[in-house]
Amino acid sequence: MATKKSATRKAAAKKPAGKQTSGAKKKSAAKKSAASADKKPMVVIASGDRPIQEVTSDLRAAGFEVDQVLHAIGQVTGSAAPSAKARLEKIKGVADVSEAHADFQLAPPDSPVQ
């Protein structure tokens, strides 16, 4: 019986240190989804005072989760906690921070003008 236990311990010791077990992955994913549930989609408009890459780096450091950097129009899309909005607006190079609103629908092309 002692050999079985020592073989199990050796097998457990051989696992790479950086790898997570499936149970740990599930817990990590649950924490991530709970944290992202508190975040709201936002759009940041750059002022043009600084390169947008620097602004994006500062946004990330302030807790903004970046989805896209739209270089051509000077905007960054992503999400953050509503409480972080004031902190994001204070970053040098940020002109505006707005919550993204994706709740709209266009009428069909053949419908009468309203």
Image (tube, helix red, strand yellow):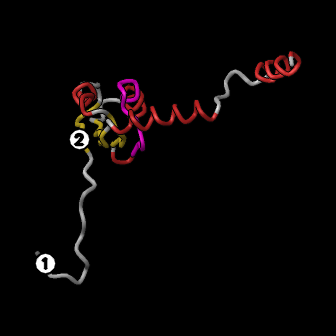
For disc 2, the marked residue is 98
Nearer to me, 97 or 24: 24
Q: Left or right: where does residue 49 sit relative to residue 2?
A: left
- Mark 2 lies on a secondary structure that is strand
How packed is label 1: few (under 14 Cα within 10 Å), some, or many (20 or more)?
Answer: few
Q: On the image, which quarter does residue 94 sit in?
A: top left
- Give x and y (percent) for residue 69: 41, 42
Counting residues from the start of the chain, the first of labels 1 and 2 encountered is 2
How packed is label 2: few (under 14 Cα within 10 Å), some, or many (20 or more)?
Answer: few
Q: Left or right: where does residue 14 sit relative to residue 49?
A: right
Nearer to me, 88 or 92: 88
From this viewpoint, which residue is outermost toward the left? 114
User: Tag on residue 113?
Assistant: 1
Q: Quadrant of the N terminus?
A: top right
For badge 1, the amino acid type reads Val
- Give x and y (percent) for residue 72: 38, 47
From this viewpoint, which residue is outermost toward the bottom? 110
Q: On the image, which quarter does residue 20 sit in?
A: top right
For badge 2, the amino acid type reads Ser
- Give x and y (percent) for residue 29: 50, 36
Residue at coordinates 25% horizontally, 33% vertically from top-left?
82
Q: Quadrant of the C terminus?
A: bottom left
Label 1 – label 2 distance at C-alpha: 29 Å
- Mark 1 lies on a secondary structure that is loop
Per the rendered image, the range of residues in magenta is 59-71
- Give x and y (percent) for residue 45: 28, 40
From this viewpoint, which residue is outermost toward the front? 1
Q: On the image, which quarter does residue 11 sit in?
A: top right
